[in-house]
Image: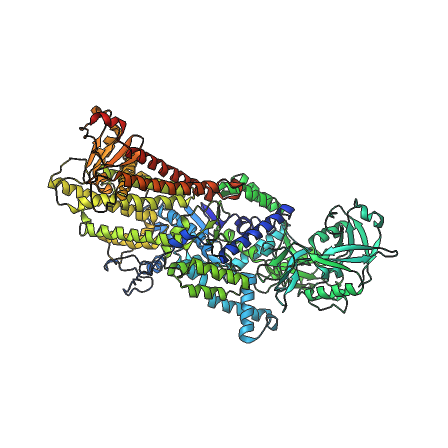
Amino acid sequence: MWRSACGLSVRAAERAIHRKCLRRLYSHNAAKPPKSTPALRTQAEKERRRRDKEKAILSSQHNNVEDQGMKWSEKERIVYSVSTPPGEKKDTTVPFPSSYSPEYVETSWYQWWEKEGFFTPEINDRLPHAVNHSFSMCIPPPNVTGTLHLGHALTVAIEDALVRWRRMKGYKVLWVPGCDHAGIATQTVVERRLFRERGKRRQDLSREDFLKEVWTWKKEKGEEIYHQLRELGASLDWSRACFTMDPGFSSAVTEAFVRLCDSGLIYRSEGLVNWSCALESAISDIEVDSMQLSGRTLLSVPGYQNRVEFGTMVTFSYPIDGQDGEVEVSTTRPETMLGDVAIAVHPDDPRYQAVHGKQCRHPFSDRLLPIITDTVVDMELGTGAVKVTPAHDHTDFLLSQRHSLPRLTVIGGDGTMTPLCGQWLEGVKRFDAREQVMDALTEKMLFRGKRDHAMSLPVCSRSGDVIEPMLKKQWFVRCGEMGQRAQQAVDEGQLEIIPHFYTKTWSSWLSNISDWCISRQLWWGHQIPAYRVTLPDSTDTQEEVWVWGRSEEEARERAAGKYGVAADTITLTQDPDVLDTWFSSGLFPFAMLGWPQQVLLHSLVRDKHGRKMSKSLGNVIDPLDVISGISLERLQEKVKEGNLDPRESMVAMEAQRKDFPKGIPECGTDALRFALCSHKAQGEDISLSVSQVLSCRHFCNKMWQTVRFMLGVLEDRGAELGTLEQTSPLNSMDQWVCSRLYSTVLQCEQGFERYELHSVTAALHSFWLHSLCDIYLECIKPVLSQDSGAGALGQIDTVHTGRGSQREKQVVRAVLYHCVCVSLALLSPFMPFLTEELWQRLYLLRGEGGGRSVASLCLQPYPQSSQLAHWHFPQEEADFTLVQEVVRVARSLRAQCGMTKEKPDMWAVCSPSQAQILLHFGPAVRTLGRITKLHLHCPQGAGSLSFPSAPPPPKGSAVGVVDHSCQLHLNVQGGVNVSKLSLQLSQRREKLLSKLEQSLSRTRVPNYLEKVPERVRVETENKISALEQELRNIEEQLSALQGPPKHNSGQK
């Protein structure tokens, strides 16, 4: 067993707190909180929202902005054609392709990483920067029968980013892969295949032979999950991959069961369970979906040719025995009346005071039913009298315990009526029996009517069958004490929940848990290591006696010692049931790594329409389809293959036609991972759209073109490049970009430490795209293209010799090289394929290794801000914000004046401090603003300048406002048409005012803060703020166009 210094478990939240975390053994919650009226209202509200989303999909409404984002054309697929045996390093000495192609980039790298053992903890011994820390994590074991969807991809992207970051930090890292055996799902898949190919049912085979069929299927089909994980670039230690049915893990499951039984935390009892008649097995509460019905509804039910009616309330009467009169009762399940053993009324209900203690006679069994009183009865619901069926209703079961009532099972495990119902119903399917019972009641003149009734129908999420509460003897886990200990672990700091605001949710769920039924009536799974004991001279009427053990031999010894008999006189019969799959899966982190120290909860991924991704909705997106691309036709075929409800199929296919009219473009693994990690995963659910992934692919291309440009600039000068420590920026723009990189590294450090990956990706995207490409690269192109003369990055009017210019070029190349190299290392945890491909090219450029060198970026030290301290120039960063605003306004003025190629002169009328900054960054202003010359005019305080103030700007210039103390005047040849420009600004102002009103109106809706998610509110507020700022700028420009500023009047 690997023992970790820092264990982390990653889960999806909020629902994952019970669907993922609390399924696990350390919390043991398989029960939902007690149902209440608010809970029912919540279910109804969810159903209403679901219907609204369906209507929006089926209507003509769709997101125009999104559609624009999804405009794409098929890109050329460049293929890596060099013969490279699997596991051999990719050859990066071949010519650099002209454009980015995910297929080219992602070829061969993963096989090389895996073969070289880069993903094992043992690689740490080969790292020069190794530290004495370890980090371990296990993947939440996915279903062996399934395929990953984007929700799984989010978990993998987050986990792999953290793992790769820690590995680059020098930690000894272990990330354990595995998958669970998925008891119900796997058995169902194999049963269908068996029937389809050989016309046989499971029961036609012995248990041993059927399990051989399952293992055969697993060997054939069970590796698809692992293939997907490799395609996603997950740096898992495959040498330690674990399947929950492996012998070693099975031993851990048995050990856990025995220990929990020995400590009294597992017990056997008779209780009501959620029973799926289609599966003939108990299922967990969280495998039960609540279908909200507003009234009479016909539904398809497995095993029935015709649709079955639900959503109605049937009322009938029970005659009072020995006197005239009757008691009317109402039920949505009239077939269960064969198991009625009493009638309950509220003790204070005046309508039934006279019948307390009386009895009613059952019309079909002639059984006497006592009329009992209990305050649990709702006098306002129905007739106020309740039929009591303890063996088929949870509330009635509790009543039977309080009033010592018998429990009659009238529906069998296969969904047919039992012999207790009489010959006329024995063997009849339960919903067919429903109709026969109502007909019989009518015949006996006891039927009193049927009406529509809004209700919540429990449905098995595995089979689609209607759940039947069933009285069964099963094994249960006592969850209360363990729930308290799990809360205590968090309270005392032994276990950390990330983000911390989920701690309350954690405590809430653990405070409302019930005992967990872990028996499943399946053949595939871990057979329960408990044995029924038959002692010498025992009779069938004796109470069941059970023992448990790690083996049958141990169980026999336990039984012999417990009952004082010889071991060879005991007969043991192992329980044929298997353990709930989640009992096994819940042990996965403990069996592999020990007790976790942290649990990281992340959001759910929803589709673009806000719907949870679900196979039953047909909106699941395979991450491989986003990586490689897929046609609309193939997407639609996948929906048809899913055996969906016809309406759900129609909605799913219509959503696909609107969302992906041309299919899904090839985006690549790196773009998908980066897009997933760019969302704030610690909060609200994520509505991921493919257009966001496509945008990240464009970012990948930007990175590719940047390195391509840099390779052209460096050519054969790689040996001239000094180390990062040796490189000192000379001029203002070098210092600014270096300082921006320092700040970016600092943001990455802080974001990773807080597990806020979205802040890391945002910082990296901003630096590469805006700071490096949009600004720095544009500024250095002139200096790299000139032979000698004026320094393009120095201050205004500073003239350099040819020799000085060459030094400037050398520093610029070094700064550019190190900015790119450091950025690639920063991005590596998110984009492992692209960064490796580009880094290897640069590594080769420096002459530090051949094309087949074993060096890999994923093992390089992760950049630290302390290493870039000599690159920190906070004043340069602060001052440059003014430059960016000036450039923005200058470009806006150029656009307003219709300038495309012209480079006019520009005057900045500003304060002395602003003038000094603009002087310092003058070349950048000229280059980025596309102007010929920058004139700095200071109406006030010119005497404090270190240079002479320029004359006032000429009349007729186009005027733009930077802030209250800085105006720009663009000298337009032939003057500016003030009337035309004023008209354009006025028209723009009207459009903005309309948009602003629309945005503000959205914030005025009732209960805006409660109804609108925080993410949407923040987006709306930012939009309003931007609109208001642009309106202020337009007003200031219109004011400036009316005449020159007052402070210029005295200088004409």
- What percent of the width, then of the height, locates residue 34? 64, 48
Front one among 241 and 530: 241
Check the image and report above or below for 788 versus 411.
above
Quarter of the image with the C terminus in it: top left
Q: Say whether residue 655 is left or right of residue 516.
A: left
| Residue reaching furthest to the right | 322
- Colouring mode (rainbow / by chain / secondary structure / one colour): rainbow
Front one among 636 and 1044: 1044
Q: Say whether residue 431 is left or right of residue 489.
A: right
| Residue reaching furthest to the bottom | 198
Q: Quadrant of residue 436?
A: bottom right
- What percent of the width, then of the height, locates residue 567? 67, 61
Check the image and report above or below for 917 versus 129.
above
Q: Is residue 373 visible?
A: yes
Question: Total number of numbered labels?
Answer: 0
Front one among 988 and 221: 988
Q: Residue at x 34, y 35 (%)?
A: 1035
- What percent of the width, then of the height, locates residue 305? 63, 69
Check the image and report above or below for 485 versus 950.
below
Q: Residue at x 40, y 40 (%)?
A: 993
- What percent of the width, then of the height, locates residue 448? 77, 58
Q: Quadrant of residue 441?
A: bottom right
| Residue reaching furthest to the front | 979
Q: Is residue 235 visible?
A: no
